[in-house]
Image: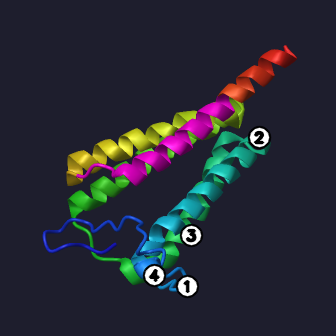
Amino acid sequence: MPWSSDNRPIIVPPSTESLGKRNHDLRNRSTGVYQQYPLGAAILYAFYQVSTRFLSHSDGVLTTLFYSASIGAVITTIMVPFFWEPLELHQWCLMALLGIFGGLGHFALIKAFTHAPAATVVPFTYTNLVWATSYGFLVFGDLPDLWTITGASIIVSSGLYIYHREQVRRSDTD
C-alpha cells in the first residue's frame, strides 16, 4: 500500500478517471495499478463469501475456517515480496489482534451459515458499510460522496429485498 509523507495510507477511490472516461472517451481504458486494487478486493471478497457459504454446509466449522485461512494466507503471501517492510513491535501486536479478531469474525460467519440460510445472514454483513464509513471519518476525516451513498443504498436495498422475499417465501411454505 502506498504511504503519504505523514505516514498515512493513500486510499484511491474509484472514479470516472479510473474507468478511462477522461474527456468522455470510453475507448481509453488506461488505469493505474492502485486503482485496480478495489476491484481485486471485491472479487476476492465475493469468492470468500461464496466459498464460505458452500463449505459451511459440507464441512465442519473449524475445517472451513482452516481452508479459508490457508487460501487467504497463500494469496497474501504471494504479494509479500513486493510490498513487505519491516515491522515494529506495536505493528506486530496490531497484526496479531487483526488475525485474532478476523478469525473470530470468520468463525462467527461460518457458524451463522450453518444455522441459517444465506438470505438471512448476508443482510447483517451490510453493517460493514456503517463501520467502514465510521472508521473512514474517525481515522481519515473522510465522508462518502453522493455516488458512494447511492451505490451503498442500492446494495443494501437489494439485500433487504432479498431478505424480505425469502421471509415471505418461507411463510408461504409453512
N-terminal-most mark, 1 or 3: 1
The answer for how far apart the CA atoms under marks 3 and 2 are is: 24 Å
Instruction: Assess disc 2: are there few (<14), some (14-19) or many (≥20) residues with their C-alpha within 10 Å of its C-alpha.
Output: some
Q: Residue 126: x percent and y percent?
A: 50, 39
Q: What number of labels is visible?
A: 4
Instruction: Assess disc 4: are there few (<14), some (14-19) or many (≥20) residues with their C-alpha within 10 Å of its C-alpha.
Output: few
Q: Is residue 147 visible?
A: yes
Q: Residue farthest to the front?
A: 24
Q: Residue 111: x percent and y percent?
A: 63, 34
Please tell me whether mark 1 or mark 2 is closer to you in this view.
1
Check if residue 48 falls in the magenta segment. no
> Which residue in the structure is indicated by mark 2?
57
> Which residue in the structure is indicated by mark 1?
27
Which residues make up the magenta segment? 142-163
Question: Quick one: SS at disc 2?
Answer: helix
Please tell me whether mark 2 or mark 4 is closer to you in this view.
4
Q: Residue 56: x percent and y percent?
A: 71, 42
Circles 1 and 4: CB atoms closer than 8 Å:
no
Residue 55: give its label.
none
Q: Residue farthest to the top?
A: 174
Residue 31: give its label.
4
> Which residue in the structure is indicated by mark 3?
74
Q: Quadrant of the C terminus?
A: top right
N-terminal-most mark, 3 or 4: 4
Q: Amino acid at mark 3?
A: Val
